[in-house]
Image: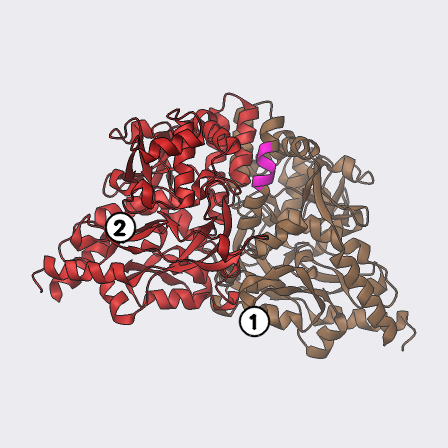
Chain colours: A red, B brown
């Protein structure tokens, strides 16, 4: 259908012409004026408290204590159960968040501006590995780290970014793809490249070198620091692709630990959901799949732009980490995802695949024609609140989301 | 011959048990007490002024002006021609230097200690790209940068390193190999990993944040910053492998722009030399092979330890940069070099080759049996003094060096 082809061409053009730049870190209350007291934004499509998984409930209890809306975790859970908090998806507020994806008033958010389309997208700072709120962690150490991010680290990075013209991300991603990152489960190269850009400005704008050293060590010690930047970038790239009449390109994929949701350009902001699947992966010592929570987080926005599982060929080292088979065969994932993509990205290429561009623009028609669901590289949270990450793996987006979206798209263009 | 097999086993054991740690930056006069006024250490085996290539003569003129031993470049060249300076290889003083490899009294040298064998090795700081002394550059901008390295940057890095326990390099190299570096013509990952380690200590020990920002930007802006660290590391690993009776393992390869020289463990510190070859590679815009100087520098110590051309499979992106064919076939270089290596390194592995260890310990017998000379990834200098880098390429070590070494080795073990 020519209408759909033209619409998808426009969608891919908007994706490839995006110019995402990391420009600031500001409190969520400034970034998202609609964010009010007792509002909690979470990952994935909408979900009620009663339907939330363990780590999501754990994170909500933790963030409520952090914001001073509850005296302790029990109090927070009781209040949540009686409707004291207002839950919304990050995606409804130009934002994304990894795993549980908590966004509330006082948290510092990174700001990525898509300079081509003048829109902005937001994501909280990556907390590091181990016991962290995005994996459902909520104890005093988790809250103390959030307080440091809010009071010291976030403002420092914001000052550094505002002292210059921002950090353009398109070229940084291109370099990261030549350095083994796929920007979902492997971000060590991009985290280092970002540190190279940020460090001089952090030094010039620092008022306390002990805090400066702590900030530099925090970025340098967190191989996943860049993930949250990649997510805000992904959101900033995909938001202008929304609402192209007839386009069958996916504009968002995300999971709340209960449901998987997708949005498609031609069907606007409607969520097409299905029960989320369980990742297949590798577990940290002492944990098994019996400990695993189903798939969770807004991070699969990176697959939506051709990274993560779609760029596995760039990242043979991640194949082992996520249990995706032989490192030398990582390119097979990228080749397979090319079958469901509308195009390839000539600026984001994979050297080991002789500079093949990453698959760009998931076409729901191709997903259904081929039966190939998008491959997602993901972290795995413990199913209980308060524990944290237990592994990493690969998961497929549920086909039911794409089936529902295609029916709605067909209706939107007058096909029964 | 069992004597040789046993000796080579010992050589490989010493290589693999090395524990190189970057511990300091100190003036060459402290690092190498034997270094005196008017002494100039250079890359490669011994060479007289009259036999030196253009960039080597250019660098010597420049460093003589820098040290105050000549009023200008002409005066320096005239003095050099009349024997005013004492030339020696870096390798004779526990040191290595890239390309022209100038080492003189006042320059800051990085110190790598091999903690297993308690020996130390030295290398000057990488000057960055463009017009630099290692490529024969010698104008005021080149000397001003050397002065800044001597007066500000070198002391700052030294303070930072001394404030901690040093930076262990073995694991850093292992990570770099998973991030597309081969540590000769591609060091962007290791340079970033080193910055991550250094930056907090630089911040804690800084007394001026403008200089700190400049130092952070210098490291962050130089993708080859780590090369000189890798070289000092290589020297620190290979020096304890010298003088094992009967061993046919290469302990050093280097070039002075005129001759290529190798040392072999069983024949001690004797140089086996041959005229150096011309790299085959790619040239920067505006330059051609007519501008190229023959192969030069001590940097091929990294191939001696299994990196550079031997680790090409880790670095598909470098294949294009050095003109070595299709990126997807970079692994062929590593496979070929495995044919002349005594072992492989289980800690330095290449994900895309399903974690094959890099070829370790060049056995001169295998070089001659197979006819496969070591592959070296190299920068290419302009043949005239004062110009700088014009490209990068691949070059082979001349077979004549290995022939001469094998005859001497045979004699050393009583075989005629």
Which residue is denoted by mark 2 in the rendering?
A17
Quarter of the N terminus of chain B within the rendering: bottom right
Q: In the displayed structure, does residue A67 sit left or right of residue A200?
A: left
Q: Which mark is residue A390?
A: none
- Residue at image position (74%, 38%) is B28
- Please, which chain is the residue tagged with disc 1 on? B
Residue sitting nearer the eye, A269 or A288: A288
Residue B125 point in image, percent of width and height: 64, 41
Which stretch appears magenta? Answer: B195-200
Provide residue B103's location: percent of width, then percent of height.
Answer: 71, 43
| Secondary structure of residue under mark 2 | loop
Above or below for B155 versus A390:
above
Q: Toward the viewer: B327 or A193?
A: A193
* Residues marked 2 and 1 touching at CB (< 8 Å): no
Measure how far apart labels 2 and 1 are at the Cα level.
Answer: 37 Å
Q: Is residue A298 left or right of residue A216?
A: left
Q: Nearer the viewer, residue A229 or B185?
A: A229
**Image disc number at residue B332:** 1
Q: Is residue B247 visible?
A: no
Neighbor class of circle 1 (other Cα within 10 Å; few <14, some 14-19, many 20+) is some
- State which chain disc 2 sits on: A
Quadrant in the picture for residue B71: top right
Residue A69 percent across, percent down from the top left? 37, 25
Q: Residues within 10 Å of mark 2 (few under 14, many from 20)?
A: few
Q: How many marks?
A: 2
State the residue lying farthest toward the right: B414
Residue at image location 86% in from the left, 68% down from the top: B246
Q: Magenta stretch: dominant SS?
A: helix
Determine whether the residue tagged by mark 1 lies in a helix, strand or loop: helix
């Amino acid at each position: 259908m020519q209408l759909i082809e033209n619409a998808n061409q426009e969608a891919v053009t908007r994706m490839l012409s995006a110019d995402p730049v990391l420009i600031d870190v500001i409190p969520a209350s400034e970034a998202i004026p609609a964010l009010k007291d007792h509002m909690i934004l979470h990952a994935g499509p909408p979900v009620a408290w009663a339907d939330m998984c363990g780590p999501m409930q754990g994170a909500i209890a933790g963030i409520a204590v952090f914001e001073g809306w509850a005296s302790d975790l029990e109090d927070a859970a009781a209040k949540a159960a009686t409707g004291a908090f207002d839950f919304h998806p990050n995606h409804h507020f130009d934002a994304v968040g990894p795993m549980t994806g908590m966004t509330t008033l006082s948290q510092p958010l990174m700001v990525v501006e898509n300079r081509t389309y003048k829109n902005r997208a937001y994501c909280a700072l990556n907390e590091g590995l181990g016991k962290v709120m995005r994996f459902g962690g909520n104890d005093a150490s988790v809250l103390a780290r959030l307080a440091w991010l809010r009071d010291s680290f976030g403002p420092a990075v914001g000052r550094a970014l505002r002292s210059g013209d921002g950090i353009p991300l398109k070229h940084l991603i291109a370099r990261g793809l030549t350095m083994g990152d796929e920007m979902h489960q492997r971000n060590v190269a991009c985290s280092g490249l970002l540190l190279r850009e940020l460090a001089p400005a952090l030094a010039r704008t620092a008022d306390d070198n002990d805090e400066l050293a702590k900030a530099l060590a925090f970025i340098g010690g967190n191989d996943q620091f860049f993930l949250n930047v990649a997510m805000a970038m992904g959101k900033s790239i995909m938001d202008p692709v929304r609402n192209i009449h007839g386009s069958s390109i996916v504009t968002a994929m995300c999971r709340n630990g209960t449901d998987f949701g997708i949005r498609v350009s031609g069907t606007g902001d409607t969520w097409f959901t299905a029960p989320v699947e369980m990742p297949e992966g590798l577990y940290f010592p002492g944990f098994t799949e019996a400990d695993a929570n189903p798939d969770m987080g807004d991070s699969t926005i990176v697959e939506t732009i051709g990274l993560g599982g779609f760029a596995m060929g760039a990242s043979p080292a991640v194949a082992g980490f996520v249990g995706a088979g032989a490192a030398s065969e990582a390119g097979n994932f990228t080749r397979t995802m090319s079958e469901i993509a509308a195009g390839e990205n000539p600026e984001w290429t994979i050297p080991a695949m002789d500079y093949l561009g990453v698959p760009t623009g998931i076409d729901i028609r191709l997903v259904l024609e081929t039966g190939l669901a998008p491959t997602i590289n993901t972290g795995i949270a413990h199913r209980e609140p308060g524990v944290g990450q237990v592994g990493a793996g690969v998961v497929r987006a549920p086909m039911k989301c794409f089936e529902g979206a295609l029916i709605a798209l067909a209706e939107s263009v007058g096909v029964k």
